[in-house]
Image (cartoon, grey):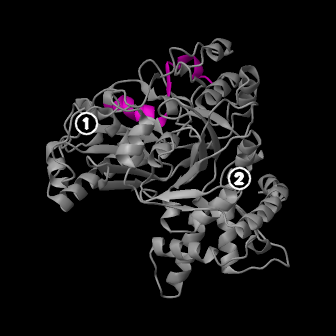
């Protein structure tokens, strides 16, 4: 391992190339984070983007991918120069992460055959059901193999031309390095992984009823393995100004689930984390395989290849954000314009003074379909009865509860399997407002929830740490590296479930489950 001679001096680290860049393409934001030798963030840049619903498909254009990446990196380089007087030209390593799953199919000329189909699409029901039954392994609607198999079943014209399948992170990494590889965690959202061999499950590959998948899928790499180096063409794509030089090593590209585990130090058995963004998901590292197949639970892996049960919900904090924007517009109409963060924080804090059960109110945050509850499409709803208690505090508590409702249903299935947790960590922008979402999440999952000082940094910081691990993998496994070198002095706060909150959330969840018929009716009527 190379010992960094500069300690934590940001200027020296930037000038010598001892910093590490992490980039994550999330559902609503592309974020770039530069970290120093001590793993602390030095500079960041971001670009907001939104998926498009085109021809009934949730998608992003590849042009938007590169525009957003370039803007995020440009903002990061400018901030580094402004803060420290040094514009980085060399880096220790780079890591790319993105939203998992979905469908990116290329022909033998490396041309995209159909628009990118994101994880948010739920049109793969027939394929997912067929493959789940055939494999005896849950294949969720959003997995890459479900999308490919559905295209085969539908006899889509592009299928015979497919020569390569990958994820968004895999695509970006390929264009930067020329290598068609994936980190094992991201690969586990394409096709089931054999955790003994850290390869695609050979028995399931042989049983697949369609095309030969072996030449179509990316090569799998584990955390700590070098996954190529930035080419001249890749450097120009990432930074058209020519500031960043080629030759920088890259770690295996990973999905947002894996980077969330790294960002919360939850890659060891009996640990778990919850990530809240456009979607919301919990990752629990298992001690042993589950006894039964559950449609609510995906089996994926950590970036190191250990088995993980994933509770993935398509709908997270987007509806909360929409209400915060509405209240912000109201403040402006009153002549008191207020920044989005201040509005969001004030509304979240108000939720703590609401009735424990949300005052009899009910909300669904379903902007898209939700497989765990059997909804193929979503309609955001707020519902109340004549005798419910409509206050701002109850309204906001109900909105936060709605973000955790489907997740809680999935976690209860996991508890039914006897899975135990020593620690549950949480990260994402929702937890920047101290003590609110953390406390209500503890009630929803029935376990203590820990939020660290890096909770708001999210997956871009997590993939930067994975890139830094290239320089430590020869000495320590990933869990030890995180515990001793990354989180050794980290500040965190743990909140245990409040029993009044638990009883209140249970009452809300009972109402939530009974009211799913309302959501289904809205989908059919609107």
Mark yes or no: residue 422 visible. Answer: yes
Q: Residue furthest bottom?
A: 335
> In front: 135, or 375?
135
Would residue 114 be counted in the magenta stretch? no
> In front: 25, or 355?
355
Q: Which residues are magenta?
A: 156-176
Q: Is residue 141 left or right of residue 244?
A: right
- Does 236 sit above or below residue 148? below
Mark yes or no: residue 275 visible. Answer: no
- Quadrant of the snapshot with the C terminus: bottom right
Q: Percent x, y for residue 392?
A: 66, 79
What residue is pinned by disc 2?
408
Total labels: the figure holds: 2
- Quadrant of the snapshot with the N terminus: top left
- Does 361 sit above or below residue 60? below
Q: Percent x, y for residue 479?
A: 45, 38
Q: CA distance from mark 2 to mark 1?
A: 43 Å
Q: Residues within 10 Å of mark 2 (few under 14, many from 20)?
A: many
What residue is pinned by disc 1?
235
Q: Secondary structure at mark 2?
A: helix
- Does 151 sit above or below residue 513? above
Q: Residue at x 31, y 26 (%)?
A: 228
Which label's residue is closer to the chain start, 2 or 1?
1
Q: Residue at x 70, y 32 (%)?
A: 290
- Does 171 sit above or below residue 152? below
Q: Percent x, y for residue 289?
A: 67, 29
Q: Residue at x 49, y 18 (%)?
A: 163
Q: Percent x, y for residue 248?
A: 24, 33
User: Do residues under tags 2 and 1 come within 8 Å of each other at their CB atoms?
Assistant: no
């Amino acid at each position: 391992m190379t010992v960094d001679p500069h300690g934590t001096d940001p200027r020296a680290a930037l000038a010598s190339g001892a910093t590490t860049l992490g980039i994550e393409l999330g559902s609503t934001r592309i974020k770039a984070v530069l970290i120093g030798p001590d793993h602390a963030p030095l500079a960041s840049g971001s670009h907001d983007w939104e998926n498009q619903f085109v021809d009934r498909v949730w998608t992003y254009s590849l042009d938007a991918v590169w525009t957003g990446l370039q803007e995020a990196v440009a903002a990061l380089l400018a901030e580094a120069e402004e803060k420290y007087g040094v514009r980085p030209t060399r880096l220790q390593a780079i890591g790319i992460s993105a939203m998992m799953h979905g469908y990116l199919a290329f022909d033998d000329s490396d041309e995209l055959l159909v628009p990118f189909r994101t994880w948010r699409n739920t049109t793969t029901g027939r394929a997912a059901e067929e493959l789940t039954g055939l494999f005896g392994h849950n294949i969720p609607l959003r997995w890459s193999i479900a999308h490919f198999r559905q295209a085969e079943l539908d006899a889509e014209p592009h299928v015979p031309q497919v020569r390569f399948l990958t994820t968004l992170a895999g695509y970006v990494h390929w264009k930067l390095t020329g290598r068609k590889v994936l980190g094992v965690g991201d690969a586990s959202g394409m096709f089931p992984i054999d955790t003994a061999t850290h390869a695609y499950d050979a028995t399931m590959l042989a049983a697949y009823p369609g095309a030969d998948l072996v030449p179509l899928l990316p090569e799998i790499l584990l955390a700590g393995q070098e996954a190529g180096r930035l080419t001249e063409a890749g450097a120009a794509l990432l930074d058209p100004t020519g500031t960043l030089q080629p030759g920088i090593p890259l770690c295996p590209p990973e999905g947002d689930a894996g980077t969330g585990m790294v960002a919360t130090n939850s890659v060891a058995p009996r640990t778990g984390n919850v990530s809240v963004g456009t979607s919301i998901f919990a990752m629990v590292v298992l001690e042993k395989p589950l006894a039964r197949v559950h449609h609510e639970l995906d089996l994926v892996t950590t970036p190191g290849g250990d088995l993980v049960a994933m509770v993935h919900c398509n709908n997270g904090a987007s509806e909360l954000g929409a209400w915060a924007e509405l209240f912000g517009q109201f403040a402006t109409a009153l002549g008191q314009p207020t920044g989005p963060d201040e509005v969001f924080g004030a509304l979240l804090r108000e939720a703590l003074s609401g009735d424990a059960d949300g005052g009899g109110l009910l909300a669904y945050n379903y902007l898209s379909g939700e497989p765990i509850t059997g909804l193929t499409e979503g309609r955001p709803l707020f519902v109340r009865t004549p005798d419910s208690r409509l206050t701002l505090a109850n309204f906001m508590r109900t909105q936060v509860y709605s973000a955790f409702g489907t997740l809680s249903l999935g976690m209860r299935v996991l508890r039914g399997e006897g899975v135990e947790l020593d620690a549950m960590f949480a990260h994402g922008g929702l937890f920047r407002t101290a003590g609110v979402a953390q406390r209500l999440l503890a009630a929803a999952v029935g376990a203590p929830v820990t939020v660290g000082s890096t909770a708001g940094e999210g997956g871009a910081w997590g993939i930067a740490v994975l890139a830094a691990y290239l320089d430590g993998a020869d000495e320590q496994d990933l869990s030890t590296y995180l515990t001793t070198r990354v989180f050794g002095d980290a500040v965190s706060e743990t909140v245990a479930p409040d029993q009044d909150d638990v009883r209140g959330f249970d009452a809300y969840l009972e109402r939530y489950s009974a009211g799913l018929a309302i959501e289904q009716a809205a989908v059919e009527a609107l």
